[in-house]
Amino acid sequence: MDINERLGLIQQVGEEILTHEELKTLLETKKKPVAYDGFEPSGQLHIAQGLLRAINIGRMVDAGCHFKMWVADWFAWMNNKYDGDLEKIHKAGEYFIETWKACGLDTSKVEFVWTSEEIGNKEYWTKVIQIGRNSTLQRVLRTTQIMGRSEKDTLSAAQIFYPCMQAADIFHLKADICQLGMDQRKVNILAREVGPKLFGWKPVAVHHHMLMGLQAPPAPVGEGDGVERAIAMKMSKSNPNSAIFMQDTPEDVVRKIKNAYCPEKQTTENPILEYNKYIVFNKLKALHIERPAKFGGPLDIASYAELEELFAAGKLHPMDLKSGTAAAINELLEPVRKHFSKGKPAELLEQVRSFQITR
């Protein structure tokens, strides 16, 4: 695979890349660059964390990256997930990995690194302190959205220290590429600021799109920040009806999508179109629409561009689009349901479901 093909794969992942020039140079000079993502283990996965993440990681691996997944169990502890119960957090981490495997991700090509196994490393803490010493408190507080918090929230001292640790993760893992969501960009920018001075390099940031929730988006406030608005609209575990979960029943999926926001002819800020753009057309060859002959009959749509054109022209009704999308999502979730229907995966899922979720 040549440089342009590798670049093309990564560009499919990155809604924002800081910077394209640096990424191209990296691929030209390093045969197998290290890319990383990280996650706090907590709760059940929704499709943005499950299907979409598996798609993105797979592309990074196909582009020739050595992919490290940082299982941030200590970070979940600091952020008060499961009331700080590390045993429950660890089980949730195992469930996440098992889910990606069920999605078709070749987990043998991903290196999973648990924070709890690295936290005793003196070199790690040296990096954390170096970053803390070279960052103001105000600068660190501006990154708190990475935890799903804001500067206005009442934060514990552990949560204030969290961004310095996340920035240190990048250099501890020797990551050339930070492949995280747009909501994590502020800490990646912090790492890019301090990296050259403290560690001799700065990482390339490849920020993926955050999938919308199913609810109507909030009204715009002034000019606003595109990233802040995307964060406000993203799929969230805290509102179960706004998200499709990896273990939702077929009936759950149909009900949630049927009630979803999907204005006729609207192609922007439309979650049903987003699910097709970022998931369905990356996993299936076509979107099948089953509809009566009087409304045009069955339809097979071969690309997202075709779908958007049909919908914008009013040639595809929202309810028909919802019906086809629900069927496609259920098709993609069926292998996951089967995987967790018996044996150790079923036991693991039952354990995670029994845990009480805390913010």
Image (cartoon, rainbow, N blue to C red):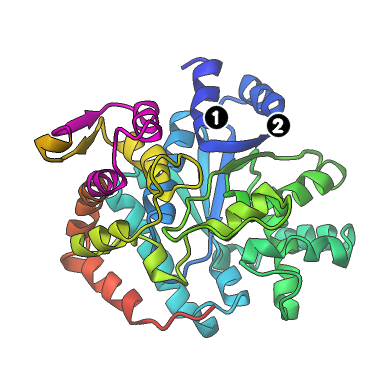
Instruction: Please indicate, yes or no, whether residue 250 appears anywhere in the rendered image.
Output: yes
Q: At 44% across and 61% down in the image, what residue appears?
A: 215
| Identity, as a three-letter code, of the amino acid under mark 1 | Gln
Q: Secondary structure at mark 1?
A: helix
Dividing the picture into quarters, in which one does residue 346 lie? bottom left
Can residue 94 be seen in the rendering of this structure? no
Q: Position of residue 136 (x, y in %)?
A: 89, 63
x, y percent for residue 57: 45, 42
When asked about the image quadrant of residue 145, the answer is: bottom right
Q: Residue 186: x, y in percent?
A: 72, 53
Mark 1 residue crowding within 10 angstroms, few (<14) / some (14–19) / many (20+): some
Neighbour class for label 2 at 10 Å: few (<14), some, many (≥20)?
Answer: few
Name the residue at 34% across, 30% down: 310
What residue did someone put label 1 on? 11
Q: Is residue 232 left or right of residue 137?
A: left
x and y percent of residue 9 in the render? 48, 28
Residue to which mark 2 is pinned: 19
Q: Which mark is residue 322?
A: none
Q: Is residue 315 magenta?
A: yes
Name the outermost residue toward the left: 293
In this image, 253 relative to 308: left or right? left
Q: Amino acid at mark 2?
A: Thr
Q: Can you tell which quarter of the image residue 232 is in?
A: bottom right
Q: Nearer the viewer, residue 50 or 227?
A: 227
Q: The magenta stretch spans which residues? A: 296-325
Q: How far apart are the two marked residues, 2 and 1, measured between alpha carbons? A: 11 Å
Reply yes or no: does residue 183 show up in magenta.
no
